[in-house]
Image (cartoon, rainbow, N blue to C red):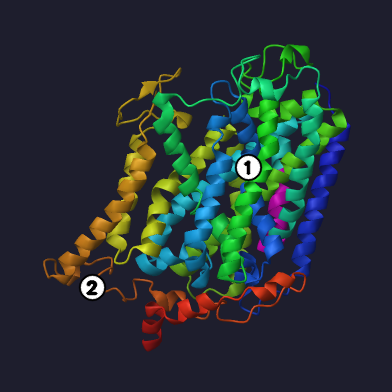
C-alpha cells in the first residue's frame, strides 16, 4: 500500500484545528472560578455548561472510535449482524435511565465527582476501593478507542500504527491538560460535527460502488455472506440479554457521564442533557450501521482489496476504514478518517479527564491530603492526566477486538459500581460492611466466570458453557447479571445484619472497626460534614449561576426542586446542628 501524503496532511490540519479550539477554550475560561475553586472549575466547568455545548459533549463522550468502529464490525460479522450490534440501543437507554433516575439526585446535592456519595456514606477506604474498577473502566475505554484510531489510520494512509496512536494521544492529553472540562467540551462540539459530516459524506459513495449489492437485498438474503440483519440463536438469547443489560445498566455509573451531569447549571438541565445525548447516540450510529451493511454486501474480489475477504483475513474489526479505503474516492476516505479521528479524541479526552478528576479529588485530596491547597490539587490533576493518557496509549497497542475490549470496559463497572450506586442513592440503611461484602462477592463471581478476551478459563462452569477454538470455555448463562444482583443483595443483607448485631448489643461497639454503625460520625468516617466543607464541595446549586448569554433557554430553567431538596436534606440539617 502506498504512502498517502494527502491523507497525512489532512490529519495534521485536523489535529492542529482541534488543538487550537482546545487552547482557545482554555484561554477563554482561564479566569473561571473564584480563587480557591480552580480545581472544581477544571472538573465540573464551573457548573455553567449550557444546553447546547452540554448536549454535544455528552453525546461525543459515548460516540467514540469504539462506538462507530465496533458497531460497523458487529453489523458486518456473518452470523451476528445488526441483531448483535447492541451498543447504540444499549447506551442510548443507559442515558435515558441516567436522566430519569440518577442525574437529579447527583446534581441536586452538588457533588464534584461520581465517587463523592460513596465516600460520604461508606468512608474514604470504600471510596478508594471503588476507584479501582472506575479507573480500569476508563482506561479500557480509552485503550479501545485509541486502538480503533490506529487501525483506521494504518489502513487508509499506511503510516506506523504506534506513531499515529501516540500523536493522537498527545494532542488529546495536551488540550485536556491546559483547559480541563472547558477544553474537552468545546472540542467535542467540533469533533461531533466532524464525525457526522465525515461519515455521512462517505456512505453514498460507498453504496454506489459497482461491487456493492443493494443492502436492502442483502439484509434478508444471503448473497456474499449471511444476511446483515443477523439473528439470535435460541441458545444465545441469555448471552444476548446479559450483554445488553451490561451495556444499558453498566453505561450509567461512569465518571465521564456524571462529569457532564455535575457540570450542568441545574438538575433539570442535567436531565435534559441526558435525553439529548440518548437521541444523539442513535443518530450517530446510523452511518456506522450502514457502513457495516455495505461491507457485508460487497464482492471484495471485485475491488482492489481482493481475496480473501476481510472476515477471512481476520480484519473484521477494521471493516469501517476498509470500506472507506476501497469503496470511496481517495479524497472522501480522508474525510471519513477525520471523522474517526474526531471520534477517538472526543472520547479519549473525556476518559483521561475523568480518571484524573477522581484520583485528584477522591484519592489524593479526600483520603490523604484533606488540607491540600487548590493549586496543589490542580497540579496533581495535570500530572495524572499525563500518566493516565500514557497508560491508555500503551494498552491500546494490545487490543485484539475493538468490540470485545469495549464490552470488557463496562464489565467491572456494571458488576461492582452499579449495585453500589443503587444502594448509596436509593436504599436507606446500607453501610460500609455491606458495601465491602457486595464488592467482594461481585468481583469473585465475575472472575470465576472466566474471560475469553484475556484467555482466562472459568472456575465455575454455568449451564450451557462450551469451548471455543482456543479451548477457552464460553458462558451462555447470564453470569455477569447474576454477579451484579448478588453484589446488590449482599450489600443490603450484610448492611442490615451488621446494623442489627451492633444495635442489639450482640456485638460489642469495639468490634465496629470501620466506624460504620456505632461510631458513624467518628473522625475515621468521612461524613457529610467533611464532604460539604467550604474548601471541599461548594453546593453551587444554592449559589447564583452565571447566565449563559448565548442561550436564551438558560433563563427558563430554574432548579427550585433541587433547592428544596437540599434544604430538606436530613444529613445537612444534622451537619448544621453539629
Q: Mostly what secondary structure, the magenta segment?
A: helix
Label 2 neighbourhood size at 10 Å, few (<14), some (14-19), many (20+)?
some
Q: Which residues are magenta?
A: 168-184
Q: Which mark is residue 393?
A: 1
Label 1 element class: helix
Q: Is residue 189 above or below residue 535?
A: above
Residue depicted at x 71% and y 62%:
52
Q: Quadrant of the C terminus?
A: bottom left
Residue depicted at x 34% and y 51%:
439
Label 2 element class: loop
Answer with left or right where residue 490 lies relative to residue 154.
left
Residue situated in front as seen by the camera: 510 or 256: 256
**Residue 117 in picture, x, y percent from top left:** 43, 66
Q: Are marks 1 and 2 in contact (CB under 8 Å)?
A: no
Q: Is residue 87 above or below residue 230?
A: below
Residue 241 in the magenta stretch? The answer is: no
Location of residue 384 (image quadrant)? bottom right
Q: Is residue 486 above or below residue 474?
A: below
Residue depicted at x 44% and y 47%:
414
Residue situated in front as seen by the camera: 386 or 485: 485
User: Closer to the observer: label 1 or label 2?
Assistant: 2
Amino acid at each position: 500500500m502506498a504512502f498517502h501524503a494527502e491523507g497525512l496532511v489532512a490529519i495534521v490540519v485536523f489535529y492542529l484545528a482541534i488543538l487550537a479550539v482546545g487552547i482557545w477554550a482554555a484561554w477563554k475560561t482561564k479566569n473561571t472560578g473564584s480563587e480557591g475553586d480552580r480545581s472544581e472549575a477544571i472538573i465540573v466547568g464551573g457548573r455553567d455548561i449550557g444546553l447546547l455545548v452540554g448536549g454535544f459533549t455528552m453525546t461525543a463522550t459515548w460516540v467514540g472510535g469504539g462506538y462507530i468502529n465496533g458497531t460497523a464490525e458487529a453489523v458486518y460479522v456473518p452470523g451476528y449482524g445488526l441483531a448483535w450490534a447492541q451498543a447504540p440501543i444499549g447506551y442510548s437507554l443507559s442515558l435515558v435511565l441516567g436522566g430519569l433516575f440518577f442525574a437529579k439526585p447527583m446534581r441536586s446535592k452538588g457533588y464534584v465527582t461520581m465517587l463523592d456519595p460513596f465516600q460520604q456514606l461508606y468512608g474514604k477506604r470504600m471510596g478508594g476501593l471503588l476507584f479501582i474498577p472506575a479507573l480500569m473502566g476508563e482506561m479500557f475505554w480509552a485503550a479501545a478507542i485509541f486502538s480503533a484510531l490506529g487501525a483506521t489510520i494504518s489502513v487508509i494512509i499506511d503510516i506506523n500504527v504506534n506513531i499515529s496512536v501516540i500523536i493522537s494521544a498527545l494532542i488529546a492529553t495536551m488540550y485536556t491538560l491546559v483547559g480541563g472540562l472547558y477544553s474537552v467540551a468545546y472540542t467535542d462540539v467540533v469533533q461531533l460535527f466532524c464525525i457526522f459530516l465525515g461519515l455521512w459524506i462517505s456512505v453514498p459513495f460507498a453504496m454506489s460502488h459497482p461491487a456493492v449489492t443493494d443492502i436492502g437485498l442483502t439484509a434478508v438474503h444471503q448473497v456474499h455472506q449471511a444476511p446483515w440483519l443477523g439473528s439470535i440463536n435460541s441458545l444465545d438469547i441469555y448471552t444476548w440479554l446479559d450483554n445488553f443489560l451490561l451495556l444499558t445498566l453498566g453505561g450509567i455509573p461512569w465518571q465521564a457521564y456524571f462529569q457532564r451531569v455535575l457540570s450542568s447549571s441545574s438538575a433539570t438541565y442535567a436531565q435534559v442533557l441526558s435525553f439529548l445525548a440518548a437521541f444523539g447516540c442513535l443518530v450517530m450510529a446510523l452511518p456506522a450501521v450502514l457502513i457495516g451493511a455495505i461491507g457485508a454486501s460487497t464482492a471484495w474480489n471485485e475491488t482492489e482489496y481482493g481475496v480473501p475477504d476481510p472476515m477471512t483475513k481476520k480484519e473484521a474489526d477494521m471493516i469501517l476504514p476498509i470500506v472507506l479505503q476501497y469503496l470511496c474516492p481517495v479524497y472522501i476516505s480522508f474525510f471519513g478518517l477525520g471523522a474517526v479521528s474526531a471520534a477517538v479524541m472526543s472520547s479519549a479526552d473525556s476518559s483521561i479527564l475523568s480518571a484524573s478528576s477522581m484520583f485528584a479529588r477522591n484519592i489524593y485530596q479526600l483520603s490523604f491530603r484533606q488540607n491540600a491547597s487548590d493549586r496543589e490539587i490542580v497540579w496533581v490533576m495535570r500530572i495524572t492526566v499525563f500518566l493516565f493518557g500514557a497508560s491508555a496509549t500503551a494498552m491500546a497497542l494490545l487490543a485484539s477486538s475493538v468490540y470485545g475490549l469495549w464490552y470488557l470496559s463496562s464489565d467491572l463497572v456494571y458488576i461492582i459500581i452499579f449495585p453500589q450506586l443503587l444502594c448509596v442513592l436509593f436504599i436507606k440503611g446500607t453501610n460500609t460492611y455491606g458495601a465491602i461484602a457486595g464488592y467482594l462477592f461481585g468481583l469473585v463471581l465475575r472472575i470465576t466466570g472466566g474471560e475469553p478476551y484475556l484467555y482466562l478459563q472459568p472456575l465455575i462452569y454455568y449451564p450451557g458453557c462450551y469451548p471455543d477454538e482456543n479451548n477457552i470455555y464460553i458462558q451462555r448463562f447470564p453470569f455477569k447479571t447474576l454477579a451484579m444482583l448478588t453484589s446488590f443483595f449482599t450489600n443490603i443483607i450484610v448492611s442490615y445484619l451488621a446494623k442489627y448485631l451492633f444495635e442489639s448489643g450482640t456485638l460489642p461497639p469495639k468490634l465496629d472497626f470501620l466506624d460504620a454503625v456505632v461510631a458513624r460520625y467518628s473522625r475515621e468516617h468521612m461524613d457529610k460534614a467533611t464532604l460539604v466543607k467550604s474548601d471541599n464541595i461548594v453546593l453551587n446549586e444554592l449559589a447564583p449561576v452565571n447566565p449563559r448569554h448565548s442561550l436564551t433557554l438558560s433563563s427558563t430553567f430554574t432548579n427550585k426542586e433541587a433547592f428544596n431538596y437540599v434544604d430538606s436534606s436530613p444529613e445537612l440539617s444534622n451537619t448544621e446542628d453539629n
